[in-house]
Every structure is written in structure tokens, then in C-alpha cells.
Image (spheres, helix red, strand yellow):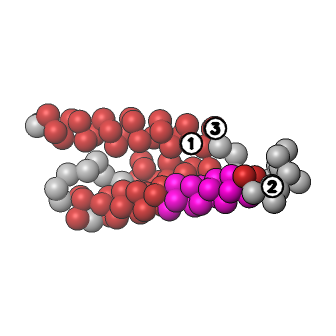
Amino acid sequence: MMASEVVCGLIFRLILPVCLAAACLFRYNWLSFVYLIYLLLIPLFAEPTKTTMRGHTGRLLRSLCFTSVTFLLLHLIFQITINSLMAGDNIEPDFNCEY
């Protein structure tokens, strides 16, 4: 077994689930539910190899990356919007989205 296969296996079976679990635990919203679904799907897929990356495992990892980047961009847009509204005094400084 090559060292790169061991590293890929560790990342896919250990680091990725830990990161997804942390995302679910520290962020309580619908984004956590999406990450929980990915977390539950990981055991159903084979470890990444050249062959499996062309199949379902590759599609799972690409969709996870796309989803994460989309969530990041949406969060950045939200933060920029809120901060610009606060800078222009168009919103209360103690604004809370829960109300």
C-alpha cells in the first residue's frame, strides 16, 4: 500500500468526519443539517483512489466542496451586508437575527 493511499484513507475516514461533526456541533442552523447528512453518507462510500474518484466517491467529495464553498460565500455576503448596514446607521447596533 502506498503512503498516499494511507494519507487519503486517514483524511477521508478520520479528519473529514471530525470536521463535519465539529461543523454540526458548533453551528446550530440548517447548514448543520446538510453537514450531518454528509457525515452520515461517508461510511457508505469507498475510500478515495484513482478508480473511486471517477465514481460516486468523487461526486460526493465534489458536492461537499461545492456545498462548503457556497455556504462560505453566502456567509460572507451576509456579513458584508450586515456590517455595511451598521456602518451606515441603517440598522440598530444590537441587531439580532433571532428576533
- 82 falls in the magenta region: yes
- 11 falls in the magenta region: no
Residue 78 spot, x, y in % from top left: 64, 58
- Seen at 23% across and 65% down, the residue is 54
Of marks 1 and 2, the one in the foreground: 2
Q: Quadrant of the C terminus?
A: bottom right
Amino acid type, residue under disc 2 in the picture: Asp
Whether 98 is drawn above or below 22: the answer is below
Residue 90 spot, x, y in % from top left: 81, 60
Labels 3 & 1 near each other (Cβ < 8 A): yes
Identify the residue at the far right of this view: 99
Neighbours of disc 3 within 10 Å: few (<14), some (14-19), many (20+): few
Residue 31: assigned label: none
Element carrying mark 2: loop
Q: Which residues are magenta?
A: 70-85
Left or right: 56, with 79 as reference point: left
Residue 26: assigned label: 3
Left or right: 19, with 83 as reference point: left
Amino acid type, residue under disc 3 in the picture: Phe
State whether residue 97 appears in this view: yes
Amino acid type, residue under disc 1 in the picture: Ala
Neighbours of disc 2 within 10 Å: few (<14), some (14-19), many (20+): few
- Seen at 68% across and 56% down, the residue is 84
Give how far apart the Cα atoms at labels 2 and 3 are.
30 Å
